[in-house]
Amino acid sequence: PTDPTDPTDPTPNTIFGTGNSETINGDDQNNSIDGLGGADVINGQGGNDELLGGTGNDNLDGGTGDDTLDGGTDNDLLLGGGGQDSLLGGNGVDDLQGGDNNDTLDGGLGNDLLNGGNGADTFVLRSGDGNDQISDFTPGTDELLLDGLTFSDVTVVQSGTDTIIRETATSQDLATLINIQAADLDSSNFEIPGGIVGTGNDDIPIQGNAQDNLIQGLGGADSISGRGGADELLGGTGDDILEGNAGNDTLMGEAENDILRGGGGQDLLIGGNGDDNLEGNGGRDELIGGNGDDNLEGGGNNDTLDGGLGSDLLTGGNGADSFILRSGDGSDDILDYQDGTDNFLLDGLTFSDLTVVASGGNTILQETATSQDLATLFGIAPTAIDATDFATI
């Protein structure tokens, strides 16, 4: 049972209105207050409260605590107050004010007024809800959550000193960002459940945020940045630039000639088709060139480099790096093999299947049965190479 004297009791005190216009006050506990009908004034005060306006033009004030406010029908005023609050306007022309901390504001149906207040706030937009006026959107801090839409479904339009977020297919205005320049917005300002999807054309820079993002460039020459979090970036067709930045990221160039940069963290970079340039940068990275003549640079730390098909250029960089060799992949040039530090991983081969051949001041690793050159080691003498440099996978 609920103990109304115990502030740690998570069970809310439930209070119902009469259906008339009235003022209902909660207390410092967790309250659930339903105004039912009438033009009500509901004050949650302390605790984590749930306030329901019902029908009528209601005034809901969460007070302190992490509160949930639902205006219901008609034209309501919702004040989050302190805490991380969730405000839902419902039907009608509503005024939502988040207050302090990180709040979520969803105007619902109607042309609503939204003000997040202090903190990193999220504004929910969906097709058919109306054109909401957002008075204090801060790019780089606040986010627009597209419910049922993707980034490719909207157009960002400058209108005087304001920016309009418009649904492209219907030409419906979803939101107006007051005193915001369209040039200051990119995909990092949008949150899309299930990931961010490009338009299929040459896109403006597509950026994630500090969370774990799934970003798909689709067609066109895209520039995609994951920023923070463990991101998955898919270039699609076109000559794309993918940058993982911080976090343990997966970057896949897919088709055409792509540039992949892992950034910090332990990243997986897969070039796919085309002549790709892969840069692991910091962290223990795995680089796979795929088809084409690729350039792989591990960067700092202990990296694994697999050129794949084609004549590839491999540079391990600092750290103890591993170079994968297999029959039929083509002849790779390895520029900085460090004997005693780096090693080779043989896929489908053993050291006994190889011949070590001198070539000027370099060494060629050759598959004996086919006389195929697997790799050229620049600046390495054949006498430095023996079975201890190899492992099988």
Image: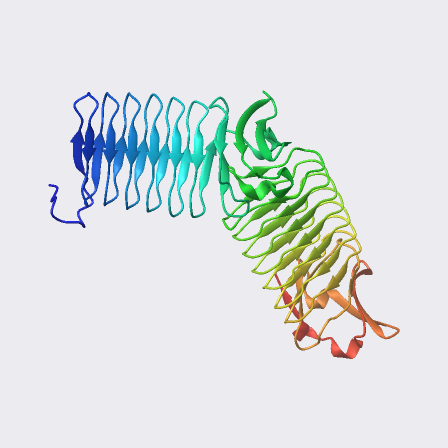
* Relative image position of residue 53 (x, y in whole percent): 28, 27
Q: Residue furthest bottom?
A: 383
- Res 288 quadrant in image: bottom right
In x, y percent, where is residue 322?
65, 66
Horizontal side of 360 relative to 131 (left or right) equals: right
Residue 286 sits above or below residue 203 on the image: below
> Residue 98, position in %: x, y?
38, 40
Query: Quadrant location of the C terminus?
Result: bottom right
Who's the residue at 30% across and 44% down the image? 66
Pick the front one: 1 or 92: 92
Count of labels shown? 0
Q: Nearer the viewer, residue 189 or 77?
A: 77
Decide: is 155 above or below 63: above
For image coordinates 32% across by 30% down, the residue present is 70
Say which of 184 and 161 sits in front: 161
The type of colouring in the image is rainbow
Quarter of the image that includes the N terminus: top left
| Residue 147 appears in the picture as rendered | no
Most distant residue in the right direction: 360
Q: In the shown orientation, is residue 143 left or right of residue 238? A: left
Q: Height in image: 326 above or below 183?
A: below
Work out whether residue 140 can be spotted. Answer: yes
In which quarter of the view is residue 80 placed?
Answer: top left
Task: State the residue at coordinates (34%, 37%).
Answer: 79
Q: Give coordinates of residue 150: x percent, y percent.
A: 56, 32
